[in-house]
Image (tube, rainbow, N blue to C red):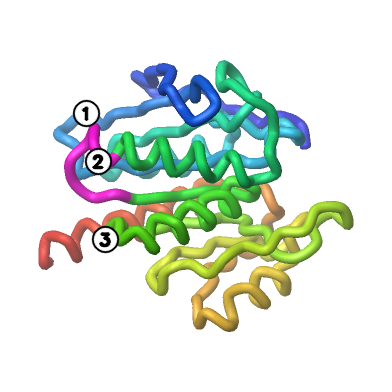
Amino acid sequence: MAPQALECLHMTDTTLLAGPVGNIEVLIDAPARAPLGVAVVAHPHPLQGGTASHKVPHQMAKALVACGYVVVRPNFRGVGQSTGVHDGGLGEAEDLIHVIRHSRKAYAGQLLLAGFSFGAFVMARAVAALTRDGVELAGVMLAGTPWGTVDGQRTYETPPVPAGTLVIHGEQDERVPLAAVFDWARPQGLPVVVVPGTNHFFTGKLGVLGRVVTDYARGKCAASAGV
């Protein structure tokens, strides 16, 4: 997978956070108004060019900032200025939990979590751990979630997620077949939002992805306000 980045969001700040094995580079985007809370977004597979600037997490971040959230996008181990080497999702989940806990302390309000592809797998692992610890989550958004054997080489056992999780998938996903994500979602009774006519990277449909994320985030905000 070649790197697919877009121009950075306006006012993106980059900082280093001390993590379990060293520095974690994080990209932070803040809304123009007082934030409603914080959203943490996880990126796709580092060994296939995935970074926090990849076009899909970038699009998710753009939508969430427009909804009024501070968005934190960490780079996984070995990516950018983040310390360490790829750990197959185990160390990445540990780092992600560290970033989430730090962000929750740094920013008041709702906590939203999101991930794409490998980042969805890592975020699901983080969500499972946080849920066991009783951490309150306003919402979870996963796009291109891997399940089973992907590309004939990597196997993902993505854990179950909370009932209100938003699951988004491309109809023509060539990396994670739509049937695979249904097999994962079915036992949980999770709806899957299918974006017609697009692939794993939502090529040509990033605007649709952004609208789905926006609708979900705004719904969570309205529910919190009792609207």
The three-letter code of the residue at mark 2 reads Gly
Q: Disc number at residue 87?
A: none
**Residue identified by numbered label 3:** 220
Q: Are marks 1 and 3 in contact (CB under 8 Å)?
A: no
**Residue identified by numbered label 1:** 32
* Image quadrant where one finds the C terminus: bottom left
The three-letter code of the residue at mark 1 reads Ala
Q: Are marks 2 and 3 in contact (CB under 8 Å)?
A: no
Give the label, 1 or 3, closer to the camera.
3
Distance from label 1 to label 3 (Cα)? 20 Å
Residue 61 x %, y %:
42, 38
The residue lying at 29 percent from left, 29 percent from top is 30
Q: Is residue 148 visible?
A: yes
The residue lying at 72 percent from left, 70 percent from top is 180
Mark 1: few, some, or many residues within 10 Å (few <14, many ≥20)? Answer: few
Q: Nearer the viewer, residue 70 or 147?
A: 147
Mark 3: few, some, or many residues within 10 Å (few <14, many ≥20)? Answer: some
Residue 29 x %, y %:
35, 28
Magenta stretch holds residue 225: no
Q: Nearer the viewer, residue 2 or 153?
A: 153
For residue 136, above or below residue 194: above
Q: Left or right of 222: which side holds 209?
A: right
For residue 148, above or below residue 38: below
Q: Disc number at residue 68?
A: 2
Of the image marks 2 and 3, the number of the one nearer the N terminus:
2
The three-letter code of the residue at mark 3 reads Lys
Residue 64 x %, y %:
35, 43
Q: Which residues are magenta?
A: 104-111
* Image quadrant where one finds the N terminus: top right
Q: Nearer the viewer, residue 117 or 217?
A: 117
Which quadrant of the figure has residue 221? Answer: bottom left
Magenta stretch holds residue 110: yes
